[in-house]
Image: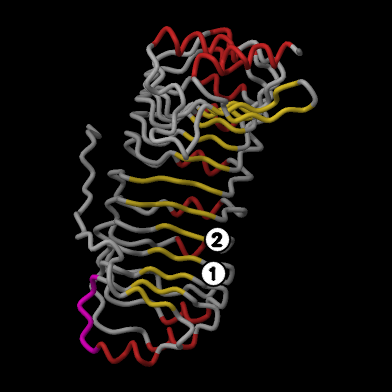
Amino acid sequence: MSHDRKVLDRIRAEIGRDPLLEFEGDTCVSLSLWDESEPFAGLIRHHDTAAQQRVLLDIAQLRGLRTLDIHQNWLRNLPADLGGLQELRSLNITSNYLGTLPDWIWGLKKLEFLSVGVNNLEVISPRVGELQNLKALYLHKNRIREVPREVLQLKGLKTLSLYLNAVPEFPSFVTELPDIEMFSWGISGITRFPREIAAWKKLKYLTMVCCQFDNMDGIEECTSLLGTRLHKNNQVKRLPPDWSGMKLLRQLTLYQNQLSELPESMAGMDQLQMLNIAWNGFRHLPPWLARMRSLTWLSTHHNDWADPSEFDRLPSKLRVVREHPFGWQPQPMWNKLDYT
């Protein structure tokens, strides 16, 4: 029996089942302690600390690992031995209780994917810039107050998630990253839509939710976008007038704002397939909606429609969601973080 298979026998005995594995020959190249089919997903979530550490120390002996997913396991610390996994390309430690990140992470020079969200982190070390091969960095749902400028050393970064942190202002310098394709920001006290993001000429997916700006001037300059989530920005009452450059946009989410009309220039967005305008202040449907040839899904619930017969003029192929599917009532999401 190979070394890796002996190690995995010990792991299997400790957790009471097989983790999710991939092999190349006798070498284990991928291991996950997360399984969505399990009631609590994390396979060692309810083990005591000593048992968790035994499993992690065994994993550290699988030196051929390229992918390691140990998220959602209620881990409070990660042993330094894991720093010996120098072949790792992907590391997911989201949804644990780490508080701080161990320094050995910055020594994993082959990492391309790193997710450390939901860990009560307040600081990201400037050493993050040492991960020169990183393509995706997820820092979401922490308490980070400052994004280190050293992220600019990650020249190949394509995905950056800063959603739900305590950063008081949009860190404009991140728009100097040349290859960003997906960016996530939200639940923030910023009062101006950061039009600097138009510098990202490859940006495909943008999340910008639960902010405090009253307009989205600049979004129309992001002409490479394929999909957006611009919802729960509770102050937004108007959109920029000219959307003629948004020819690639396929999905636009605008729910839970204060919009009462859409610019007619949106009629030229020939690729738009999904549009969500629920929970706004609309009274009438834009007549041009019926002419949008690619539109297949439209959400309109929680608006005070003056003339429901307007919906009868929409094409039959268009699926219209006029009632919330779960009957849930909207609750305003206001930023409660301390930005002082």
The first of marks 1 and 2 along the sequence is 2
Q: Residue at x 60, y 33 (%)?
A: 113
Q: Give the amino acid type for the residue marked by disc 2 in the picture.
A: Leu
Q: Nearer the viewer, residue 21 or 60?
A: 21
Q: Position of residue 146 (x, y in %)?
A: 39, 29
Q: Quadrant of the N terminus?
A: top right
Q: Nearer the viewer, residue 117 or 9?
A: 9
Residue 303 included in the magenta stretch of the image = yes
Q: Residue at x 31, y 45 (%)?
A: 187
User: Residues at badges 1 and 2 in contact (C-beta under 8 Å)?
Assistant: yes
Q: Residue at x 52, y 72 (%)?
A: 272
Q: Position of residue 27 (x, y in %)?
A: 75, 21
Q: Residue at x 61, y 38 (%)?
A: 157
Q: Is residue 182 left or right of residue 51?
A: right
> Residue 4, located in which quarter of the rendered image?
top right
Q: Quadrant of the C terminus?
A: top left
| Label 1: element kind | loop
Looking at the image, the residue that sits furthest to the right is 25
For label 1, count other residues whose C-alpha is less than 10 Å away and answer few (under 14), some (14-19) or many (20+). Answer: many
Q: What segment carries the magenta color?
A: 302-307
Q: What sort of colour scheme is used for the picture? A: secondary structure
Q: Is residue 147 left or right of residue 321?
A: right
For label 2, count other residues whose C-alpha is less than 10 Å away and answer few (under 14), some (14-19) or many (20+). Answer: many
> Residue 117, located in which quarter of the rendered image?
top left
Query: Which label is found at residue 62?
Result: none
Residue 233 included in the magenta stretch of the image = no
Disc 1: which residue = 246
Work out whether 116 lies above or below 336: above
Q: Give the amino acid type for the residue marked by disc 1 in the picture.
A: Met
Disc 2: which residue = 225
